[in-house]
Structure formats: structure tokens, C-alpha cells
Amino acid sequence: MPYLDNTQYHAHIRGMNLLSLLIGLITLPAALLAFLPFLGWMYWLIVPVALVGLVLGLLSSHTTGRWLNLAVVLVGLVRLWMGFGII
């Protein structure tokens, strides 16, 4: 990997947060829709995508995308637990 100067490094870090935030903004409405009865199975698709966003947020020094994806993952896991993974 080539050496990155300070401005390139910070641009890379901001890009990770922006990508994480974008993933969170896509999964959040899907998670709200899946909260309806009989749509809980959608969380099997939403949680892994939000986990990818969470990992990208962890690579960033900013926390916005990280917290958004963490909230989606936690809500998804609780909803899967409440609906026994299918309801």
C-alpha cells in the first residue's frame, strides 16, 4: 500500500464513514418495514448488511455510521429473537 499523506488518510477515513452511513440509511427503512408482523424473516437479510456497515464504521474515526448500523443490528437481533427467527 503506498504511503498516504495526512489529507489522503483523512479523506479515506471520511469515505469509510460515508459508506457506513449510506448502508445504515438503506437498512433503516427496511428494518422499520420488517418490524411489521409476518415480515420478521427480512431481518435475516438486513442484519448481515448492517453488520458490514458496522465494520466499515469501525474502520472510521467518525461514529455516525457506526452507531446507526449498531442500532439496526440490535433492533434486528431483538426482533429475530422475539419472532423466533421467522415471524
Image (tube, rainbow, N blue to C red):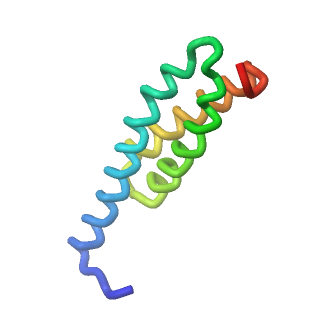
Residue at (51% x, 27% y) in the render? 31
Relative horizontal placement of residue 78, taking residue 63 as reference (left or right): right
Residue at (59% x, 29% y) in the render? 42
In the rendered image of this protein, does residue 45 appear above or below residue 54?
above
Which one is nearer the viewer's eye here, 25 or 34?
34
The percent coordinates of residue 64 (x first, y second) are 38, 42
Relative horizontal placement of residue 57, taking residue 40 as reference (left or right): left
In what quadrant of the picture does the C terminus appear? top right
Residue at the right extreme of this rendering:
84
Q: Quadrant of residue 35?
A: top right
Residue at the top extreme of this rendering:
37
Residue at (58% x, 36% y) in the render? 73
The percent coordinates of residue 33 (x first, y second) are 49, 20
Relative horizontal placement of residue 36, taking residue 64 as reference (left or right): right
Residue at (40% x, 58% y) in the render? 60
Which one is nearer the viewer's eye here, 7 or 20?
20
